[in-house]
Image (tube, rainbow, N blue to C red):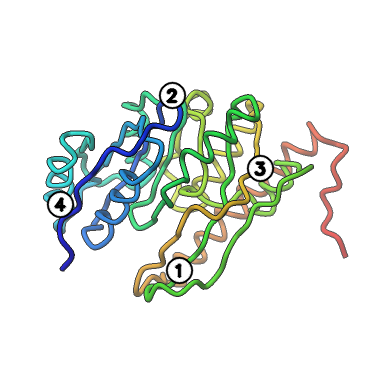
Amino acid sequence: MRPPATFARPVQTMAMRISVIIPCYNVERYVERAVESVFAQTHQDLQVIAVNDGSTDGTPALLHELSKRSAGRLTVVEQKNHGACAARNAGLALAEGTYLQFLDADDVLMPRKLAHQLSIAEQNSYPELVIGSSRILDPLGTTVRTVVQTTGDRDPWLDLMSHGLNITSTNLWKREAVQQAGGWSEGLGSSQEYDLMFRMLQHGARVVHDHEVLTEIHQRPGGSISQTAVDRNWVRFVELRARILDKLRTTRPDLDLHPSQ
């Protein structure tokens, strides 16, 4: 067993607060690693919020222990089980940062992630979304896939259609834009970040990309889900894609919405 982490205070990199929101449900095996990766960030103007979403394992006790070890820099919020989106919204209600990092409890940020993406935001007049790159690891820690964002002339609507805006933990989100879009849709079980990004784009969100691989997405053992859940997820994806198409047909008639042959 590794010794308990001590959360040092690295040198400050930029004077802008980022709120890190970690939804937690039965994640006692993973959440300490996620929290450690947050407190190892070179950017340290952080507000860190872990929302315990009615866990039934040792997650609540571990979160409160981590809060003590961090001298209170980790705020723990308790709520009944309402799902990850509700937990993110609970953290959003308390968030003070200009930007938000929504971090799933089994994922890991590389130490430069927040400072680097904040620097990209500064260089691009503070867009509403910084889309990050990622490395996906299996339960044994082997890299199974790397998703790298290319920079240049990209249309965020086409990226949204093709699922090209990566996933929740990789991105940096401007708080004001997330709030303006209405936060996370709590009734959704999948495609949650794409639903939110769709609504943000409808409000005129600007998008930039980060090609550096600074987020690790960790797959859990036994992570497969039932075929029923797979079917429901596909239905949600198709429904969201239909909404995007309807929007683009009326607002972006210049786009070629037919797949290339």
Q: Secondary structure at mark 1?
A: strand
Q: Which residue is mark 4?
A: 62
Mark 4 surroundings within 10 Å by alpha-carbon count, few (fewer than 14), some (14 through 19), many (20 or more): some
Amino acid marked by disc 4 = Leu
Q: Which residue is mark 2?
A: 15
Q: Mark 3, residues whose alpha carbon is within 10 Å: few (<14), some, or many (≥20)?
A: few
Residue matched to label 1? 137
User: Which of pointers 1 and 2 lies earlier in the amino acid sequence?
Assistant: 2
Calculate the distance from the C-alpha at mark 4 to the C-alpha at mark 1. Answer: 24 Å
Compared with 105, 18 (above or below) is above
- Residue type at mark 2? Ala
The front one of 25 and 138 is 138
Mark pair 1, 2: CA separation: 33 Å
Q: Nearer the viewer, mark 3 or mark 1?
A: 1
Q: Name the quadrant of the C terminus.
A: bottom right
| Residue lying at the far front of the rendered structure | 11
Q: CA distance from mark 4 to mark 2?
A: 30 Å
Q: Residue at x 27, y 41 (%)?
A: 50
Indicate which disc, 4 or 3, sits on the residue closer to the N terminus: 4
What is the number of callouts on the image? Answer: 4
Task: Please state, as top left, top right, bottom left or bottom right, where the N terminus lies in the image.
Answer: bottom left
Q: Is 224 placed above or below 248 here? A: below
Label 3 belongs to which residue?
Answer: 243
> Is residue 202 shown above or below 190?
above
Sequence-earlier tag: 3 or 1: 1
> Is tag 4's residue or tag 1's residue first in the polypeptide sequence?
4
Whole-number angstrom distance, CA of label 4 to CA of label 3: 41 Å
Give the label on residue 187, or none.
Answer: none
Q: CA distance from mark 2 to mark 3?
A: 39 Å
Query: How far across and down, in percent of the image, does residue 175 sit?
Result: 47, 27
